[in-house]
Amino acid sequence: MQVIPGESVILKLMKVTWPKWHALALGFASLLACWLFGNPSAAAQQAPNAGTSSSRNGANEEFLQAADEVLQQVSEITHLALRTPLKKTLRSREEIRAYVLREMQEDKTAQERYAAEQTVKAFGLVPKDFHMESFIVELLTEQVAGLYDPKGHEFYIADWIPIGDQRMVMAHELTHALEDQHFQIEKWVKAARPNDDAELAREAVLEGSATAAMIDYLLKDTGRSLRDLPDFDPEMLIGDLGNTPAMAKAPQFLKDALLFPYFTGMRFTKNALGQAGWDGLPALFTKPPVSTQQIMHPELFRTGKAPAAVELPVSEKLLRGSWKRLDENALGEFGWKEVLQQFLGKDRAAPLAAEWAGDRYALFEDTSTKKLLLVYRLRLSSAEAAARFFGQYSEALEKKHDARRNLFRRPNFFSFDAPDAGGVFLHCVNEDCLVLEGGNRAVFDAINKEIGWISAPVPPEKPQKGPEKIARMPLAPHPRCNDSAAFARP
Ligand SMILES: [Zn+2]
């Protein structure tokens, strides 16, 4: 089964790019169809390329007519009226590919893409030698089946996919188009900036609602809707997604990040609309979820649990040396679940991440050596949760840095030196945990002081290793040392 959401989400969480378009891949739509109806539809097959130009003219009319029909049906499903005629054009695979690449390049500077990639690597979310950008280009151009461009307010119809298969994709894309006419989706998503976590939550509303509308479109002749389906675990839908060439080599984090807005967003939409059904949709835009935590736990959206504002006053000056800030933001519960999952596995990561109450990270790069320094602070739901986090994250840090020296462990403080990264420090106080990777003890102390914490415990002084002493020891061993050593032998 060909499955690739041609969407940008990955791209988003890690801010490698922020495309101003919303797309869906045919394979993804097919996966949902399989999930609903239990049989692989024709849509799951790789569609042939478009025919000759003469057959294309005839097809053109058919495509545009199909789009009008689906638009009408989706408008009825979502209760969103079409306010102005929709711009729609038939595009070849090459045209859509070129558009996607151009948007990707234009939207972020090379420096921003570099910073985003370094952040993902510093958290251990992808291997250090992984070529993120070339992977994303491959993924994006593999199989986009249609897209809606909210910048130009235009629907791009893929001309190489048979109309029967297109309709599903259209139902998704045209939901974006209708939402755009009512809620100005690009501006609305951007209003969450600079908070990445809140922005991803809004993205999940867009993708989740468009996917939910697509499901209702698929079910429309059965007398049922998404609302009638039992609650589901979004993870169960991910199973088949490693099958395409690009996805097969994607690190788990990229797969999860790619699919999060669609699956978890769809489940959120189903829950948040509740009994009101699609009439509840405008409320999701006027009072949107503020975190990925609310997307993952819709009950927290209902109760209005918002993340704590976590302060991380770390400046280049405080760090001393030639550090330059590359990036600063929040990972959110979704990002933290991914980080924990890398080192502790899924089963342990999910409940620990659910204790997330807020976070802030900052990434710095040494301008001459290009070494990275990552500092982050998490707020947990309680002091007990912070203690649990301390224990488990100590283990995660050990797995992350497999070569370690000078381990020092106390009930709320853990540190070691990693040859590849530099000093690693974890300190928890009440509900908060502070981590520094890539610094030294003096820098860590300065950060603790800056946030108003008492210093972390200090390792016992090591015996001095002055050259004089080293030189003297073999020359004049203390007789009692020899005695006690002999005494200690079994
Ligand atoms: Zn979409």
Image: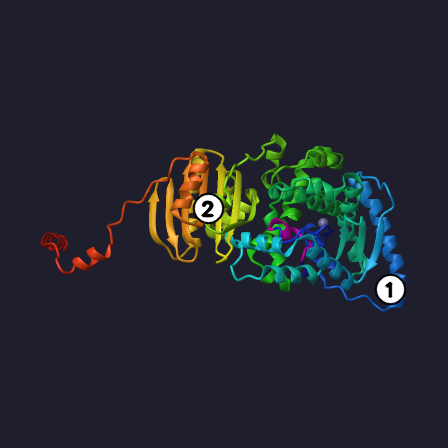
Quadrant of the rendering where the N terminus is positioned: bottom right
Q: Is residue 287 visible?
A: yes
Bounds of the magenta span?
4-14
Mark 2 or mark 1, earlier in chain:
1
Residues under labels 2 and 1: Cα distance?
62 Å
Work out which quarter of the rendered image holds the C terminus and state it: bottom left
Question: What is the quadrant of residue 428 in the picture?
Answer: top left
Which residue bears the numbered disc 1? 56
Q: Secondary structure at mark 1?
A: helix
What's under tag 1, amino acid-wise? Arg
Provide residue 270's location: percent of width, then percent of height.
68, 40
Identify which residue is drawn at 68% across, 44% down: 208
Front in this rendered view, residue 480 or 384: 480
Give me the residue at 38% from left, 52% from top. 417
Residue nearest the viewer, comparing 197 with 314:
314
Q: Which residue is mark 2?
A: 319
Q: Amino acid at mark 2?
A: Leu
Q: Is residue 289 a member of the stretch shown in magenta?
A: no
Residue 337 x, y percent position in the rendering: 53, 46
* Element at label 2: helix
Could you say which quadrant of the image residue 90 lies in?
Answer: bottom right
Residue at (62%, 57%) from the top-left corner? 240
Q: Name the front one of labels 2 and 1.
A: 2
Q: Residues within 10 Å of mark 1 (few under 14, many from 20)?
A: some
